[in-house]
Image: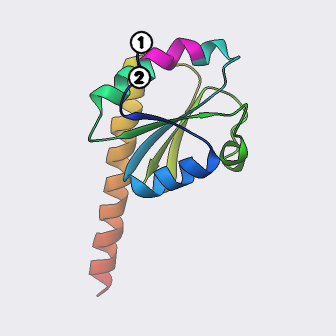
Amino acid sequence: MAAARNLAELDDEGLLAFVREHPVVFVDFWAPWCPPCRIVAPTIEELATEQEGRVAFAKVNTEDHNTVASGLGISSIPTFVLFVDGKAVAGLVGAAPKHDLEEFITKTISEAHDGAHDHERASEARR
């Protein structure tokens, strides 16, 4: 299966820049020796293609690039982290079926945006 256009393979520095450039980023922290990582990889590629224009996708090989993963406290892989507006807002550990990953993305984005709107409403109420 060819890599999805919307799935960037990044190192630590590249990931930090990528997260700043895209409003919503799904990151797959993985390693080549990890069987569950390899099992879920085609699903991540499918999601990257289906979610293009809504969510940017990235993969970080923690075997070669572990600074960001360590900073996020990631100790098991695969771990999926969703960044919204440059901030890590939710994580999911372990291989999961496509439906669960879709639900994780949709729910997390919705909650992140609802939280931002709640903060805006609270700021307006104080004026």
Quarter of the image that includes the N terminus: top left
> Which residue corresponds to the image point at 33% horizontal and 74% vertical from the top-left?
122
Secondary structure at badge 1 equals loop
Location of residue 16 in the rendering, given as x and y in whole percent from the top left corner: 55, 53
Location of residue 38 in the rendering, given as x and y in whole percent from the top left corner: 57, 14
Report the front residue among 94 and 16.
Answer: 16
Question: Which amino acid does the dot numbered 1 rest on?
Answer: Met
126 over 105 or under it: above or below: below
Secondary structure at badge 2 equals helix
Residue situated furthest bottom in the rendering: 127
* The image quarter in which residue 46 lies: top left
Q: Which mark is residue 1?
A: 1
Sequence order check, earlier mark of 1 and 2:
1
Total labels: the figure holds 2
Magenta stretch in the rendered image: 38-42
Question: Which amino acid does the dot numbered 2 rest on?
Answer: Glu
Residue on which the image places disc 2: 45
Location of residue 3 in the rendering, given as x and y in whole percent from the top left corner: 42, 22
Whether pointer 1 and pointer 2 mark residues with C-beta atoms closer than 8 Å, the reply is yes
> Which residue corresponds to the image point at 64% horizontal and 12% vertical from the top-left?
35
Magenta stretch mostly in which secondary structure? helix
Quarter of the image that includes the C terminus: bottom left
> Which residue corresponds to the image point at 73% horizontal and 31% vertical from the top-left?
63
Report the front residue among 78 and 57.
Answer: 57
72 over 50 or under it: above or below: below
Location of residue 28 in the rendering, given as x and y in whole percent from the top left corner: 54, 32
Q: Is residue 47 left or right of residue 60?
A: left
**Is residue 85 visible from the viewing direction of this image?**
no
